[in-house]
Image (cartoon, rainbow, N blue to C red):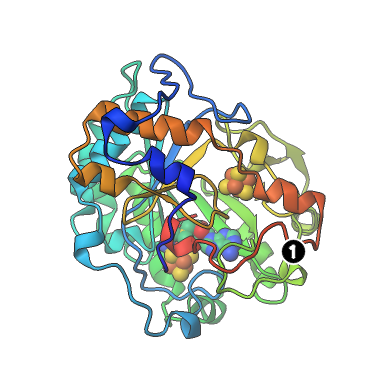
Amino acid sequence: MPARTIPLVDQRLLRAEPSGLPAAPLALDGALRDALGRPLRDLRISVTDRCNFRCGYCMPRERFKGHRFLPHAQVLSFEEITRTARLFMQLGVRKLRLTGGEPLLRRDLDRLVAMLAALRTADGQPADLTLTTNGSALAEHAQALKAAGLKRVTVSLDALDDAVFRRMNDADWPVADVLAGIEAAQAAGLGPIKVNMVVQRGVNDGQILPLARHFRGSGVELRFIEYMDVGSTNGWQLTQVLPSADVLQRLREMGELHPAEPAADGETAERWRWADGSGHVGLISSVTRAFCRSCSRARLSTDGRVYLCLFAHGGADLRGLLRGGADDDAVLQAIAGLWARRSDRYSELRGAAPGAAVQPAAGRVEMSFIGG
Ligand code: SAM
Ligand code: SF4
Ligand code: SF4
């Protein structure tokens, strides 16, 4: 993906010259708030831009043919990631999520997990440390990840039917491997496990009920995500989105559902519970019901850029600061300054003016680069 930089004002902010840095609001004892009053609570860390799948909605094969992935020298080391995460945690982050590309492709990931598990928030708590994976290699890694200190996993799974699944991952990968990965993660104690299904009308909406039946009563929480217009390679169209309201209607064919409380603060899913006590399902209505007002996430790309929104056109180059010898205070101030200026609310604006171009898709960061 072309690595773009943020507008000049923020580049100045990130210059590795402590003396030239503007005073930024550091809130070491509480939540740091952005321009819309949203706290900084979550950091998503992309550990690789590579993936063994080519999901059409994320890394369409024809568009990623010949794509130049990041060379090793541009990839943040485990030490750089850990330092960055430690500083984000000093600013109020409580939740760290490892993602990618496919994070389990990064060699020795359990070593990074152990390093992150040792970090503490400003009030002495370990982070809620989680991982999002396509599950293809989870069976072989689950035990080691758990032993290293990973708390939970979220597995992406778009179909139960093997043929539909192979078509969707466009890598001929069998669904059995992902199901085995989920079982291994459950056995290792990496739960409660969430499974995310991106629903595309006409592609896999026929898999909503089979997946719901499969996971009902298993302790795994299945969540349905509306297909989003992220990036600029997937050719997204509104007609391909199946609204959560329609998903809910279909689920009701299986039984009675009642609204349920969110499992955690800032959760993006609207949760429902089966009336017979057989568990929960979640609906993530990124398109039809934007949740920008509670968006507390920053994203760190594999090459050390900070993105403040999934729909951003550029990220702030933190790697330059880290490798330029900046001390912790300078990095803290840079991050705090970025967050203080944040006013992104793309989905909300798009929702308010359906069909209108809120901002051009061209040049938008790709999902596989910042990890969702
Ligand atoms: N490779 C890992 C995986 O698939 O779980 C982690 C990275 S992937 C980019 C993170 C999440 O983004 C996955 O759950 C994926 O389904 C979701 N995703 C990717 N493109 C999307 C899109 N256009 N709309 C909605 N979700 C998307
Ligand atoms: Fe890979 Fe995940 Fe994107 Fe699919 S959604 S192509 S598994 S990064
Ligand atoms: Fe957060 Fe941007 Fe998504 Fe809104 S559009 S919820 S600000 S990532």
Task: Indicate left or right for 215 with 16 as reference.
Answer: right
81 up-or-down from 266: above or below = below
Task: Indicate left or right for 50 with 156 as reference.
Answer: left
71 up-or-down from 271: above or below = below
Residue 148 seen by the camera = no
Residue ID for mark 1: 242
Q: Tell me which corner region of the image, top left, top right, bottom left or bottom right, holds residue 179.
A: bottom left
Badge 1 residue CB within 8 Å of ligand 1: no
Q: Residue at x 66, y 49 (%)?
A: 346
290 up-or-down from 199: above or below = above
Task: Indicate left or right for 176 with 203 as reference.
Answer: left
Judged from the image, the secondary structure of the residue bearing numbered disc 1 is: loop
Q: Residue at x 27, y 40 (%)?
A: 16
Q: Position of residue 349 (x, y in %)?
A: 74, 48
Amino acid type at mark 1: Leu
Q: Quadrant of the N terminus?
A: bottom left
Residue in front for this viewpoint, 40 or 279: 40
Q: Tell me which corner region of the image, top left, top right, bottom left or bottom right, holds residue 91.
A: top left
Q: Position of residue 347 (x, y in %)?
A: 68, 50
Q: Position of residue 161 (x, y in %)?
A: 56, 75
